[in-house]
Amino acid sequence: MHGTGSFVSGGNVTSATEIEPAVVIERHDGWAEVILNRPERRNAITGPLGTALDAALTALSGDPEVRAVLLRGAGGAFCSGLDLKAFNADPVPDWLAEFPRIWRGAHRALFRCDKPIVGALERYAINGGAALALACDLLVSGDSDFLQVGEVTLGMAAPYNLAWLSLRHSEAVNARVALIGERLAGPELVRLGIAQSSVADDTVVEAARSLCATLAGHPAGAAARIKSTLRARLGQDADAWFDRFVGDGAGAARPPMLSERS
């Protein structure tokens, strides 16, 4: 289990208290990759991963050399959702009580990032992982890879999924995605307007990197101004927006005992 939620940037580890960082940053010419780095758990979400994602996105948002961000998972999968093994561990993880605050921080950082965020959806993005994919401004999916907002099948709410869906899509699309809870593969995501493109499964990262390079080639500040204008139409900051869906409790800290998805 990861300890502090540190991340690696440019080869320098920001914390020495864990062997493998929860999130890694790889920098390119004008853009950067943010990589969820728990491949042994299909990049499942824990408190340390949420903390590291917040820190990585905040760092890149303040970097004038970065004009686009690629969000992906290590090991050929995007994100399998909450790490239920970690959440239900005994003894209780020290981060568990703080998870609602941590997870809000990660989504706040996604909302506030003034760089275009491109998601590379490999294999799957499930539940909490789907919320991260939906937070991306542009999403590249594999043809047989899928996104699933499946909380309804578990009797749970899907607040951050609904927040991002409502930010970008119509009520009809939101209902299609969230009420049925089924897997939506790349071509259907494109049809719904959720994905920018659907490509062969083994070319997802390559296509997403190419898109980031294109975005990075635009004049400095252009994308930031466009994103600022898009956000301004809400008339709300990140917390006010998410509070409409999550409320004061910011979601349950400890999910019910459920079988894991892999």
Image (tube, grey):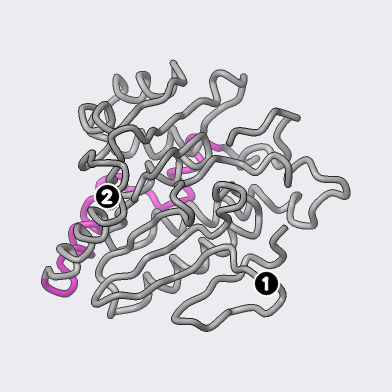
**Tag 1's secondary structure?**
loop
Examine the structure image and report whether residue 172 is included in the region drawn in magenta: no
Point 49% across, 68% down: residue: 24
Residue 14 image offset from top left, x and y in percent: 58, 79
Q: Is residue 138 above or below residue 18?
A: above
Q: Residues within 10 Å of mark 2 (few under 14, many from 20)?
A: some
Image quadrant containing the C terminus:
top right
Up-down relation of residue 64 to residue 223 (above or below): below
Q: Which mark is residue 19?
A: 1
Quadrant of the rendered image containing residue 7: bottom right
Q: Which residue appears at 45% of the width and 47% of the height?
A: 78
Please name the amino acid that badge 1 sits on.
Ile
- Tag nearer the camera, 1 or 2: 2
Whether residue 234 appears in magenta in the rendering, the answer is yes
- Can you tell which quarter of the image residue 105 is in? bottom right
Task: Tell me residue 211's x, y (percent).
Answer: 20, 57
The residue to which callout 2 is attached is 203
Magenta-drawn segment:
219-246
